Image (cartoon, grey):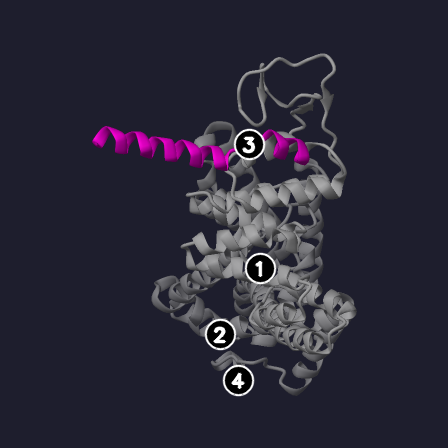
Amino acid sequence: MRRLLTLGLGLWLLLAAQAQALTPAQARAIAAGETDERVAALNAVAAAGDPALGPFVQALLDDAVKLTPQAVLVVEGDQVLDAATRLKAQLPDDAEDVVNNNRMRAALQSAAALLKLFSPQLDERAAALAELARQSIDASQLPLLDRALSSETDPTLKTRLQGLRAMLMLDAPDAAQRREAAALLEQSAESGVSSLLQEHIAREPDAGAKAAMQMALTAVERRLAWGERLGLVFTGISLGSILLLVALGLAISYGLMGVINMAHGELMMVGAYATYLVQNAFRAWWPGAFDYYVLLAIPASFLAAALVGAVLERSVIRWLYGRPLETLLATWGISLVLMQGARSLFGAQNVPVENPAWLSGGVALMSNLTLPYNRLAIIVFAFLVLGGVALLIAKTRLGLFVRGVTQNRRMAACMGVNTARIDTYAFSLGAGIAGLAGCALSQVGNVGPDLGQSYIVDAFMVVVLGGVGQLAGTVLAALGLGVLAKFLEASAGAVLAKIMVLLFIVVFIQKRPQGLFAMRGRSAEA
């Protein structure tokens, strides 16, 4: 009895496998004939869930299928197999290549992606769904999509499948189904859904379905508008964090010594080129640790810029204190010398700095809102540098001397503070922070001799708007100007936005010359 049951079960499994196998007639219908007939045959076999269809579809995409009057053959390396039976065969001389036009190839790609929705691997199903979102699939593939939806266990992928199904239902012949699809798409926040609804509204004959699509379009565009606003806020904060790094060192040197350092942008350039050299050293000598080169580039950029700043202060700037016009002209000349030096050493062209793997990519919060990892890292880095500078100024002996010299230089000198040495330390600290800004900027763009010229004017505006020597004012001014500039650019363009920001600062300084935060101390009262 047991033997009979085993035999019966084996026979049933064999029949089931044969029922699921790709037949010669199906293979020929997909490989030969008019495009409409081939697409219809492909969708019919795909809807039946034939597991043998996947390799055959891939062979068609690889142009590895041959036609003979008797069979459809697949060429796999040195082997020739029958497409239906998968048995070895001979390739006759009269075998013809299967030709796929663009429409047929698109249908094959969609079918291949749809069949991958049944993969046991979650990442393969997610990749297939992402590929389907980029392709043009039609309502004829709804049966296979329904099968995939019923078998999907992951909630996120199930939701995305439901959205894709609703998009296909917009082409359904029944108006009730199109109204149902519009109601489902009302909860979407995909930018592709907006354009799809606009296309269907223009040609929708049913008034009820058209009204439902219009309601869905309004809801989708409202969500997309929020994504765009949040994107502007993020890019503004990102720009503000870069301005904060650039202006932080400038606030220290300008607030302490009153030096209008036009070479501050070139100190950023020194830090960026130091990052470039560290990257190249890792690529040449430690390629296995390349993803960690930034950890060494950060102190290298700080030290390189700080050393250049110390040399500038001791050789040129120390003789020009109290003469702001001469300081401006001298540092402008130094900036030209540094730029020409960079051109002589590294060439006039920009040099690329590659992001580590862990800074590549981003976090997709919405279909039109992605937060890049490198921008997020710069924001975090800027506030870490700000925290370090605040602790140094408030909690260390050097910070005490800096605050004393800032508030009253003569009194600090009378108390035994070597003000000349503090000037050098402070200027070197500001230059080092500029080098850190250059290191950060190298992760979002190329490095070149003119790198600092794009930020020096904005950095001075941040320092003046925030209040000379005031860290809190520098933070608020940098972030505020960054967000304001991005919102103005979205409505008025980059050039007009820059002019409007400059006018705003001019008016603000007219009303409040001391900036957001006024300096406290005897020197402020003098």
- Crowding around mark 4 (Cα neighbors within 10 Å: few <14, some 14 to 19, many 20+) is few
Asked which secondary structure carries label 1, the reply is helix
Sequence order check, earlier mark of 4 and 1: 1
Cα separation between marks 2 and 4:
20 Å
Is residue 347 visible in the rendered image? The answer is yes
Asked which secondary structure carries label 3, the reply is helix
Q: Nearer the viewer, mark 1 or mark 2?
A: 1
User: What residue would you read off at disc 1?
Assistant: 165
- Residue 525: numbered disc: 4
- Crowding around mark 3 (Cα neighbors within 10 Å: few <14, some 14 to 19, many 20+) is few
- Residues at marks 3 and 4 touching, judged by CB atoms closer than 8 Å: no
User: What residue would you read off at disc 2?
Assistant: 472
Sequence order check, earlier mark of 3 and 4: 3
Residue at (57, 40) in percent of width and height: 276
The answer to which image quadrant residue 204 occupies is bottom right
Up-down relation of residue 173 to residue 13 (above or below): below
Cα separation between marks 4 and 1:
71 Å
Sequence order check, earlier mark of 2 and 4: 2
Cα separation between marks 3 and 4:
83 Å
| Residue 22 among those drawn in magenta | yes
Cα separation between marks 1 and 3:
25 Å
Which amino acid is tagged 2? Ala
Quadrant of the drawing holding the N terminus: top left
Q: Which residues are magenta?
A: 1-30
Q: How far across and down, in percent of the image, does residue 54 sit?
A: 55, 36
Q: Nearer the viewer, mark 2 or mark 4?
A: 2
Cα separation between marks 1 and 2:
52 Å
Cα separation between marks 3 and 2:
63 Å
User: What residue would you read off at disc 3?
Assistant: 55
Residue at (71, 21) in percent of width and height: 69
